[in-house]
Image (cartoon, rainbow, N blue to C red):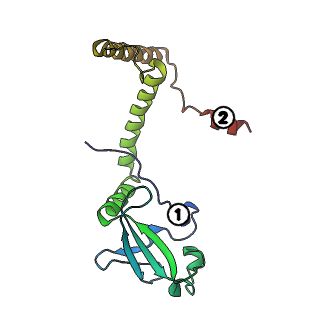
Amino acid sequence: MELLGPAPHDSSRQSREDQGFSRADFTIDWDSESAVCPGGHRSFEWWEQKHHRNGTPVLKVFFSAEHCRPCPKQTWCTKPPSGRRGRGITFLPRERHEALEAVRQAQETDEWKHRYAIRAGVEGTISQAIRVTALRRTRYRNLPTTRLGHVFAATALNLTRIDRWLTGTPLRGTRTSHLESLMLAA
């Protein structure tokens, strides 16, 4: 079984604002436990943190402020450093980092987008089943009648879809949330 879904994008300030060097612009030397910045400077501090705030083990990499302050690329990299540390970067451990980067590269291909479009169709079907037949909760207490209720719900969905296909009723677009409709009205 394969889990198919979009990988989260880089959440660093530089990547979010699309100004400057993101994590992908840094070269990681896993064997010597250091990183090299786009300016060519090597990190001076590398340490493993057992748990990030969400419970994931991470690696923290810091560059020296001595290199960051005079660097001509400093405005694209970090805020003016104070103290002995310059730019700091947080990485996942090697195996997880490489897997995440591989998924990020794969999701840019047309093959991945086609496979993900199939998933979107399945999720649309599940959403329709939940909205039309209230499938999240059962009206019955025992398993055989609950199963029968699910069979009836699936039959009703199929009849609804057949009717739409025969009458040529177009599929609805993506629903707009209440908050989004308020924002559009303003």
Q: Which residue is mark 1?
A: 15
Q: Nearer the viewer, residue 122 or 162?
A: 122
**Taking 91 as reference, is 45 above or below it?**
below
For the C terminus, which image quadrant? top right
Question: x, y (%) of residue 151?
Answer: 33, 15
Q: Which mark is residue 178?
A: none
**Taking 169 as reference, is 108 above or below it?**
below
Q: Amino acid at mark 2?
A: Ser
Q: Residues within 10 Å of mark 2 (few under 14, many from 20)?
A: few
Marks 2 and 1 in Cβ contact (< 8 Å): no
Question: x, y (%) of residue 81?
Answer: 57, 79
Q: Which residue is mark 2?
A: 181
**Taking 88 as reference, is 83 above or below it?**
below
Which quadrant of the figure has residue 184? top right
* Residue displayed at 53% across by 63% down: 15
Sooner in the amino-acid sequence: mark 2 or mark 1: 1
Question: x, y (%) of residue 61?
Answer: 42, 74
Question: x, y (%) of residue 102?
Answer: 34, 59
* Residue displayed at 45% across by 24% down: 130
Does dot 1 land on a helix, a strand or a loop? helix
Residue 84 vs residue 100: left or right?
right
* Residue displayed at 69% across by 39% down: 183
Which quadrant of the figure has residue 158? top left
